[in-house]
Amino acid sequence: MGLMRPQVLIIGCGFGGLEAARALRAAEVDITLVDKTNHHLFQPLLYQVATAGLSAPSIAAPIRHLFRGQRNVTTLLGEVTGIDANARTATLKDGAVLRWDHLIVAAGATHSYFGRDEWAAHAPGLKTLEDAFEIRRRVLLAFEAAEREDDPARRAALMQFVVVGAGPTGVELAGTFAEIARHTLPGEFRRIDPRQARVLLVEGSPRVLQAMPESLSESARAQLAALGVDVRLGARVTGIDAEGLDITTSAGAERLASRCVVWAAGVAASPLGRVLAEATGCTLDRAGRVVVEPDLSLKGFANLQVIGDLAAAQSHAPGQDPKPVPGVSPGAKQMGRCAAANIKRRLRGEVTQAFRYRDYGNLATIGRNSAVVDLGTPAGPLRFSGYFAWLFWLFAHVYFLIGYRNRFVVLLDWAWAYWTYDRGARVVANAGLAGLNEASPVHDVKA
């Protein structure tokens, strides 16, 4: 009997985990890929599911299908709850134990309510398909409830949608909510005019899209205003309940009545960060991310690497000071490839290399024909906004989607929506109006 090949365990099949597994395709290793869902999710377009523009299968792909041709990968559906770095084992929620020689943890991130977790019941975030289904349910049922409401004040609260946080996700959600109200739903109701709905974008900092240059940030704010979004900058949320939220601005405290609040203001690392800290003594930053060595490993555990949103990683470019890596999909993909390459180097007895992040720029869409683009080029930054930025954003996202079918379907759906303003994924299950602002199990019936 031959010697057993090195065992590589990858936890999480987001962008980082997927890229790491693919990069080890030709390596003489056996890979076990564990994820608590059965699909890889293209998160940059998740807001399109939440706003009824796309159905779930358009932006998700079964993990088993993705690796059907890669014979050195075994896919398991499960949730890792424990890691023993010394024994080189990982324990699943059902008690199963997996052995590993090399471990890549790419467990991603979740929502952060900055210590106010009770807000989650009233203001869902957007990280998973379940989150997207819940947001879609609340938005569509708010209009349904408004159609039946006789009290003007309660009707106004039902037709006031608030997005907290003006990063890319918040900007995209707010802009699309406005388009739904002004272009998709008019003519479908008899007692309300959906065009009278108000969309508010609440941001605690002085501008939207903080990661963008100030000129593009201002352009994004102007494009949001043109869509009818009320942008509230310098507004700090102090409370959220079933009837709305409280904010504080330089003008004082204000109450915003709303039955549909969406949270896009903060992220926190996966709970596996704390598990790793207990197992290895590694350091966590304020967001719960794992502080890693330059080669993405943990101090004292060279065969254990952390990548993606769970890693507090830095880019180590030659001749430059280390720079923090942003929590975006290109960063996770690059870390996945780096982690895989370092495993190959260890197997050959070579020295590992430090991670170097290549920043290709930032994109954000605001709505129909509206977007901002900030690209890094050899000749310097290339920045533009408006219609051509929107086209660039559209084709870039279609290009990076997983699978030709998904690309074709998304292009077809977007083309239809562009010419008709129709949004085809508006069916929701469990459509009872009771408990409108409470979480409810919901499924993408179009899927």
Image (cartoon, rainbow, N blue to C red):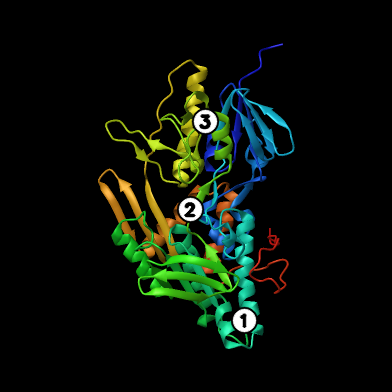
Task: Report the front residue among 420 and 351.
Answer: 351
The residue that label 2 is drawn on is 397
| Residue 2 higher or lower than 195, as above or below | above
| Residue 90 higher or lower than 78, as above or below | above
What kind of element bears circle 3? Answer: loop
Q: How many marks?
A: 3
- Residue 163 is situated, as x and y percent measured from the top left of the image, at 50, 66
Please state which amino acid type lies under the numbered disc 3: Gly
Q: Earlier in the sequence, mark 2 or mark 1?
A: 1
Residue 243 visible in this rendered orientation of the protein: yes
Q: Quadrant of residue 236?
A: bottom left
| Residue 253 higher or lower than 340, as above or below | below
Disc 1 packing (10 Å; few <14; some 14–19; many ≥20): many
Please state which amino acid type lies under the numbered disc 1: Ala
Task: Report the front residue among 436 and 397.
Answer: 436
**Residue at 62% across / 81% down in the picture?**
146
Please state which amino acid type lies under the numbered disc 2: His
Q: CA distance from mark 3 to mark 1?
A: 53 Å
The residue that label 1 is drawn on is 146
* Quarter of the image with the C terminus in it: bottom right
Disc 3 packing (10 Å; few <14; some 14–19; many ≥20): few
What kind of element bears circle 2? Answer: helix
Q: CA distance from mark 3 to mark 2?
A: 39 Å
Q: CA distance from mark 2 to mark 1?
A: 35 Å
**Residue at 63% across / 69% down in the picture?**
437
Q: Earlier in the sequence, mark 3 or mark 2?
A: 3
* Quarter of the image with the N terminus in it: top right
